[in-house]
Image (cartoon, grey):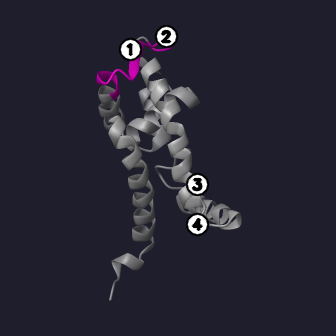
Amino acid sequence: MYQIKEGLGFQLSYAARLIERRFEEVLSPHKLTRLMWCTLVMVDHYAITKPSDMADYLGVDRTAISRVLRSLEKAGLIDRVKSEDDGRGRDVFVTGEARAKLAALMPHAGETARHFSSKLSEAEEQELKRLLAKLSSGEARETSGI
């Protein structure tokens, strides 16, 4: 009999949801979602300013990025400016308020990562990352994401 909880996909999704939920508990009082956080980090730390590049980097569709950008703009956390490279496009920049939130929350992001990585030895963590990369390799929506 098929046991869903024993499946690789279930196990991967379950572990990912545990990590996501723990960090979302930190983000929630700041009125941020994990996707909002990732977008702000992408713009501020990686200088990824084009919505299409953001979607590709995170492995999400462009409509999801459009929604999150609208929310971030409404919250005063980003500005969208007409692109110098592409007259039709708009580039995204974080505001001072967003930088302050990122600075305040970055230690919590590190703590969340440490909480879960501390359950593994360094060798186990490296092996897990290697295996996850192997699973993702060659797939249609492969990304270099966060």
Answer yes or no: do the residues labelled 4 and 1 have beta carbons within 8 Å?
Answer: no
Q: Can residue 50 be seen from the camera position used here?
A: yes
Seen at 39% across and 59% down, the residue is 17
The mark closer to the camera, 4 or 1, is: 4
Residue 37, horizontal then vertical, whole percent: 43, 37
Q: Which residue is mark 1?
A: 88
Secondary structure of the residue carrying tag 3 is helix
Q: Quadrant of residue 69?
A: top left
Q: Which residue is mark 4?
A: 119
Seen at 31% across and 24% down, the residue is 75
How far is disc 1 from disc 3 in space, using C-alphas?
42 Å
Disc 3: CA contacts within 10 A as few (<14), some (14-19) or many (>=20) = few
What's under tag 1, amino acid-wise?
Arg
Residue 19, horizontal then vertical, whole percent: 45, 56
Query: In this rendering, is residue 49 above or below 132?
Result: above
Q: Earlier in the sequence, mark 3 or mark 2?
A: 2
Q: Earlier in the sequence, mark 4 or mark 3?
A: 3
Residue 73 in the figure: left or right of residue 45? left
Image quadrant in which the N terminus is located = bottom left
Secondary structure of the residue carrying tag 1 is loop
Most foreground residue, 65 or 104: 104
**Residue 84: numbered disc:** 2
Q: Can residue 89 be seen from the camera position used here?
A: no
Which residue, as the protein is rendered here, is positioned at the far right? 123
